[in-house]
């Protein structure tokens, strides 16, 4: 478990660097370090499905961040201290710590022993019940397909939002696209 | 920076991309079709396919991938994936419930053709995710680029 804590420390350091560093490219690279560490942690915790999705989405997100932010002149102005915002952040962090202490007073189950009994059903019955040898696929696409429908709806809404916000500019630029066609 | 935008990257990157981009695309299809057997599935495979198009775009400049897979067709393919996923859910109503696995006893577990509608749902999700992500990439980056070019 020591490698888990090493990776967690690396992720925390990466996040702090991403917030504090002045250069935008360095910040994006530091965010990529956080995502890569998270992917390796998923792999160490025996969740290859999530690790694969995490690393692939992380690559896409880093490419999007680099391409969308670095080649544009983003007006950066130094912002002064906001005492009210800092006070509220400390207040909410303190509330979260208090709530966590109150919730987990009795101690948590060891890793791999879930609190609810329904999750013991899936590894036993998934292969005969659905025919899929990947238990994760049988859970997200058969037993819990409603959740996947909601996730698909979220992504659909995001894409529609992006296409709608960028709509009027996109029309003008398609003429440009044809004009610049070599 | 802006030179990379117009004409892509160096000849080394272009050659390596030409060799590997088909393999990346094939790996995405493999991840999707084996989603019910091995780790992976529709989401990861769809993102890998979108990344293969993004790879073309980064290496060769913005116009190549937009010519293969235009912004309009990304919207159409994404809507097709969403409709396919919902249709699979609604067909299940005829057999006893929403998302009922109506094709289930159709092969040994572990075979490629097995697990009923799960591979079909994987394909639908991959169409949705891949086309949606690539559409976002095209809208946010490739078409933005032409605006900044025109400004000069």
Image (cartoon, rainbow, N blue to C red):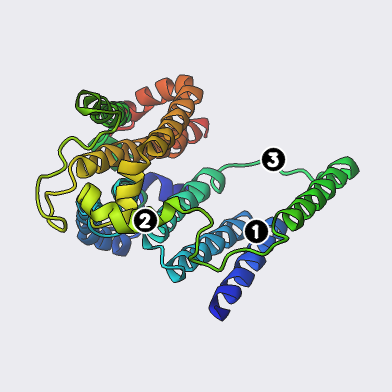
Residue B83 lies left or right of residue A118; in this view the side is: left
Specify the subunit that label 2 lies on.
Answer: B
Tell me if I can see residue B103 in this picture. yes
Q: Nearer the viewer, residue A20 or A170?
A: A20
Q: Which of the marked residues, 3 or 1, is nearer the chain's N terminus?
A: 1
Q: Nearer the viewer, residue A58 or B97?
A: B97
Residue of label 2: B9
Point out the residue furthest to the left here.
B107
At which x and y percent is residue B16? 26, 63
- Label 2 crowd bin: few (<14), some (14–19), many (20+), radius 10 Å: some
Question: Eyeballing the image, is A160 above or below A45?
Answer: above
Q: Distance of mark 3 from mark 1, alpha carbons?
A: 18 Å
Q: Quadrant of residue A22?
A: bottom right
Residue of label 1: A18
Badge 3 and badge 1 in a common chain: yes
In the picture, the disc for residue A75 is 3
Could you tell me which residue is drawn at 34 percent across and 42 percent down?
A143
Q: Quick one: SS at disc 2?
A: loop
Q: Quadrant of residue B15?
A: bottom left
At which x and y percent is residue A53? 39, 54
Could you tell me which residue is drawn at 28 percent across and 58 percent down?
B14
Q: Quick one: SS at disc 3?
A: loop
At which x and y percent is residue A121? 37, 53
Q: Distance of mark 2 from mark 1, alpha carbons?
A: 27 Å
Q: Nearer the viewer, residue B124 or B14?
A: B124
- Label 1 crowd bin: few (<14), some (14–19), many (20+), radius 10 Å: many
Q: Quick one: SS at disc 1?
A: helix
Point out the residue furthest to the front here.
A117
Residue A81 lies left or right of residue A34; in this view the side is: right
Badge 3 and badge 2 in a common chain: no
């Amino acid at each position: 478990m020591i490698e888990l804590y090493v990776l967690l420390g690396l992720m925390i350091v990466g996040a702090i660097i991403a917030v504090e560093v002045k250069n935008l490219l360095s910040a994006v690279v530091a965010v990529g370090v956080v995502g890569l560490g998270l992917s390796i942690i998923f792999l160490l915790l025996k969740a290859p499905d999530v690790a694969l999705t995490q690393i692939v989405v992380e690559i896409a997100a880093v490419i999007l961040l680099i391409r969308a932010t670095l080649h544009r002149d983003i007006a950066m102005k130094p912002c002064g201290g906001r005492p009210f915002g800092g006070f509220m952040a400390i207040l909410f962090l303190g509330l979260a710590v208090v709530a966590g202490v109150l919730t987990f007073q009795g101690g948590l189950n060891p890793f791999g022993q879930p609190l609810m009994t329904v999750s013991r059903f899936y590894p036993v019955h998934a292969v005969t019940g659905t025919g899929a040898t990947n238990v994760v696929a049988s859970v997200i696409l058969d037993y819990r397909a409603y959740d996947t429908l909601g996730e698909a709806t979220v992504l659909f809404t995001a894409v529609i939002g992006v296409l709608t916000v960028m709509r009027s500019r996109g029309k003008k630029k398609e003429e440009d696209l044809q004009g610049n066609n070599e | 920076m802006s030179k990379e935008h117009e004409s892509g990257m160096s000849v080394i990157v272009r050659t390596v991309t030409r060799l590997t981009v088909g393999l990346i695309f094939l790996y995405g299809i493999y991840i999707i079709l084996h989603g019910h057997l091995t780790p992976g599935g529709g989401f990861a495979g769809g993102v890998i396919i979108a990344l293969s198009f993004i790879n073309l775009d980064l290496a060769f400049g913005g116009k190549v991938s937009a010519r293969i897979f235009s912004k309009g067709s990304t919207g159409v393919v994404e809507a097709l994936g969403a409709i396919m996923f919902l249709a699979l859910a609604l067909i299940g109503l005829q057999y006893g419930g929403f998302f009922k696995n109506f094709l289930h006893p159709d092969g040994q577990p572990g075979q490629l053709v097995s697990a009923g509608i799960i591979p079909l749902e994987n394909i639908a999700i991959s169409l949705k995710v891949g086309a949606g992500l690539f559409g976002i990439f095209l809208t946010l980056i490739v078409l933005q680029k032409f605006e900044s070019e025109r400004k000069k």
